Amino acid sequence: MGFINFLVYLAIMMGIFAILSVSLNLQYGFTGLANFGQVAFFCLGAYATTIVTLTFNQSFFLGIIASMFLAGLFGYIIAIPTADLREDYWAIVTLAAGEIVRIFFLNEDWVVGGGPYRGGAYGVGDIPQPFRSHFAAQTYPFFYLGIVLVCLLLTYLIINRLTNSPFGRVLKSIREGDDNLAQAMGKDVKKFRIKAMAIGGIFGGLAGCLYAHYYGFISPQEFVPLETFIVWAMVIVGGEGNNKGAILGSVIIILFYNSTRYLKDYVPINETTLASLRMVAIGVLIVVVMLFMKEGLIKEKKRIY
Amino acid sequence: MLRVEELYKSFGGIMALSGVSFGVEPGSITGLIGPNGSGKSTCFNIISGFYAKDRGDIYFQGEKVENIEPFRLARMGIGRTFQISAVTERMTVLENLLLAPKLQTGEGVFNVFFRSSKIRKQEKENYDKAVEILNLVQLYALRNEYAGNLSGGQKKLLSLGRILLSDPLLILLDEPTAGVNPTLIKDLVAAVRRLRDEEGKTILLVEHNMRVISEICDKVIVLDFGRKIAEGTPKEVQNNEKVLEAYLSGSSKRESIHENS
């Protein structure tokens, strides 16, 4: 049973991170926006639902809506002043934005109700699990996996529809080199960038919401820039500009990330060293993919008419 | 159609344009020529809104154009191509063309989900137009190829095709025949002429190929060091002393007028 539980845990993590990577793929893979602050959406989503469901005792659905709305709004707002920036500056600005969100929750413990050993660096626990009372402890993870997979499916369908539409075509044209071409074609480049960020934010927030309710505990330490880079690894390994690739990438990276748990029985390295080595393993994986499959495991799909 | 008055633009210490004025008549083909660095491209970039001018006025269809973003100018009907043919590399030839029609329904996020039948209809119409244009610029066989894999000349043709599909009133062509083979140049020239004669489009083009200029232009404007040094029919301009001097006297960087013809 332990192994099956572990697999369900892995699948839930894969699902949550796949939503994050499909969201980043819309921004980076299709629009060319180097968002190094993807974790901000994740963090905002997690805290928004915690505040709604825990502090205000509202339903899970309201929590989802609040998460998506707040993270989407954040994406929209940070994109407004930055939409004219070049890719490298965009990366710096979004990285900083991600840190601002994390540090905000680290210092402002009142937002989650406050109290002793609660909020701020202590994190927040007791985040309610949706429909928990309807299930036995053994079966609940399977139900939650269902929720995550439904959310992932919806995310995939919505974003895939967008990227296959004329809207997605404009995004791709913005990605290719400078803005001049899209501008000359009469496209309001800035507006498209803002939209891509806002939509990315909405789904990043959804992932954060699912994460918070799964663990039941969140703290700012979980939303460090490292998380953003893990999502980036998923997009790069899976294939930029391919939504299926982004999902495959998250499956592989999560597997790599968790493999050390079982590897410890087979290699003569102690567990702590092994845990540190997993980031090295992901780094090596990225290098190998970049060397031998530059476009990722699943290439961007060519649109044939 | 277009009127440029006393246009000034400097980059640091270099005066790219110092007081250039000219007009482009509706339904005409006007050539903008001059040695390298004479300010032709700067002129194009200002007219299409990509550069801000220092001084001067631009009138498009009788209305003053001031501080308007490039995409809005494009929507108003000023279409342009780029000297270094900008194509979206990881998009196919057809995708490049389908990008061109302005204000497509499917470019709105909500429309994508709630107006799919209208989008399908529009896409079909645009596809048919695109195929027509692909046949014109002889790229039909390459329609599903990534634009990044095209040759330099083919990219030029694609840029031209794209601008045709976007259906502007005034077309700015930046060196449309550079890198295109001679046979195809003939077709291009014919295509541009047809645009004027059959569709009544107005065209302003920068071009180094003097044969092309003299074949299709109604009027030629010659720039040198950011100033207009001559204006007239291709014949008049070719015999103008100042023009010959500008092209022939110059530094080693300058190419002779004959090398390019």
Image: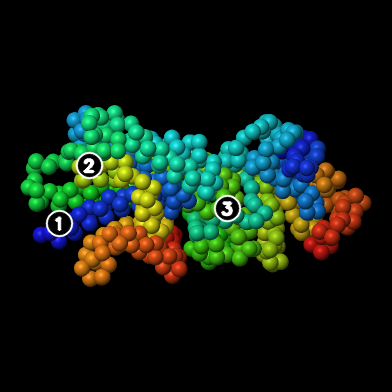
Name the quadrant containing residue A210.
Answer: top left
Q: Position of residue A227 (x, y in %)?
A: 35, 50
Instruction: Name the residue tied to disc 2.
Output: A217
Q: Position of residue A111 (x, y in %)?
A: 29, 30
Tell which of B180 and B124 is nearer to you. Answer: B180
Which residue does the image show at 63% across and 63% down from the upper left?
Answer: B152
**Vertical position of residue A291 compared to residue A239: above or below:** below
> Which chain letter goes with mark 1?
A
Crowding at dot 2, Cα within 10 Å, few <14 / some 14-19 / many 20+, comes out as some
Q: Which mark is residue A5?
A: 1
Q: Earlier in the sequence, mark 1 or mark 2?
A: 1
| SS for dot 1 | helix
Q: Nearer the viewer, mark 1 or mark 2?
A: 2
Q: Position of residue B168 (x, y in %)?
A: 61, 44
> Which chain letter goes with mark 2?
A
Asked whether, in this view, residue A240 is left or right of residue A266, the answer is right
Q: Are marks 1 and 2 in contact (CB under 8 Å)?
A: no
**Vertical position of residue A6 compared to residue A131: above or below:** below
| SS for dot 2 | loop
Q: Nearer the viewer, mark 3 or mark 2?
A: 2
